[in-house]
Image (tube, grey):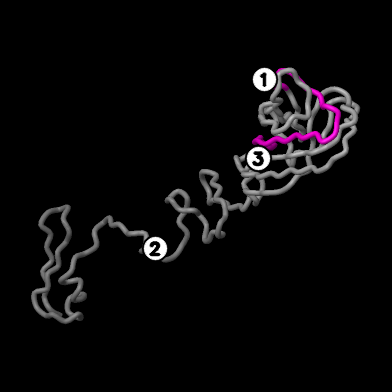
Amino acid sequence: MSDAVISRVLKDCNINIEQTTGTSTNSVMSQNACTGNFATKTHSHVVSDLISGTLPVSMGGTGKTSLTSGAILLGNGTGGISTTSVLAKSKGGTGSTNFYEKGFWTPSVASTGSTSPSVSYTYQYGVYYRVGNLVFIACHINMSISSTGSSYACIKGLPYTCATGCDKYGLSLIEEYYATNTSEGDPRGFVVQETTRIDLRGHSGAMATTWITGSNQYIGYSGCYIKS
């Protein structure tokens, strides 16, 4: 076996091994050990060096071996994350996999009292778009009204129930045509919380209104409200 010199310049320095004779890998440990550097006490790796195992949350990982494509990630602060395809309303989601929706609804003339109006419809048209909890609606009704019913005018049949805490502020609608009585003119529609009903009121919203009897009456609204 060839001779080798082992030396250390200072107490805290690396130990140096220098091969004095022989160049084959069988001489003094190995050729690499003789001519290369020993690994330092601490070292680092790039992410691409990791080829197995699961990186825990505490190390910046997910704690999961695999993830579902398109899934929503939920963390608990300590353990591995969980996944879901639907985020609950309590966590700020919609509770539905369908975030965007388009559909139709049938608006109907009604009254807030116990007696409904007597109405003959030429047509009833309603469309809605929902994005999350925000619902945009539009409706248009042509009708003949023979009796107004008791109490105040309203339209029923909205596609979703208005959220709690939005009483008469969930929706402010502009009436396209006149089929109601009000001294203020330009009656507005307000969605009542926890209902699928639009209450019709005067321009300022302070004065309720009633239906007008007669044939070929028109009314239409468009606007947004928050669903429950």
Say which residue appears at 20% left-offset and 73% top-offset. Answer: 32
Which residue sits at x=16%, y=82%?
24
Q: Earlier in the sequence, mark 3 or mark 2?
A: 2
Q: Nearer the viewer, residue 150 or 69?
A: 150
The residue that label 3 is drawn on is 136
Residue 157's place in the image compared with 35, above or below, is above
Depth order, front residue of 71/104: 104
Q: Secondary structure at mark 3?
A: strand
Residue 204's tag is 1
Gap in Å between the C-alphas at discs 1 and 3? 22 Å
Q: From the image, which quarter does the N terminus lie in?
A: bottom left
Asked if labels 3 and 1 touch by Cβ distance under 8 angstroms, the answer is no
The relative height of residue 207 versus residue 71 in the rendered view (above or below) is above
Pointer 1 or 2: first along the chain: 2
Q: Nearer the viewer, residue 25 or 73?
A: 73
Crowding near pointer 1: few (<14 within 10 Å), some, many (20+)? Answer: few
Give the quadrant of the C terminus.
top right
Determine the image quadrant of residue 205. Answer: top right
Q: Quadrant of residue 46?
A: bottom left
Figure check: 100 above or below 183: below
Residue displayed at 13% across by 66% down: 6
Confirm or deny contact between disc 3 and disc 2 (CB under 8 A): no
Residue that numbered label 2 is attached to: 50
Please tell me whether mark 1 or mark 2 is closer to you in this view: 1
Amino acid on which disc 1 is placed:
Ser
Is residue 213 found inside the magenta-colored segment of the image?
yes
**Does label 1 or label 3 sit earlier along the sequence?**
3
Q: Find residue 150 and report its horizontal and vertical position in percent.
A: 88, 24
Report the magenta residues as a range.
Answer: 202-228
Secondary structure of the residue carrying numbered label 2:
loop
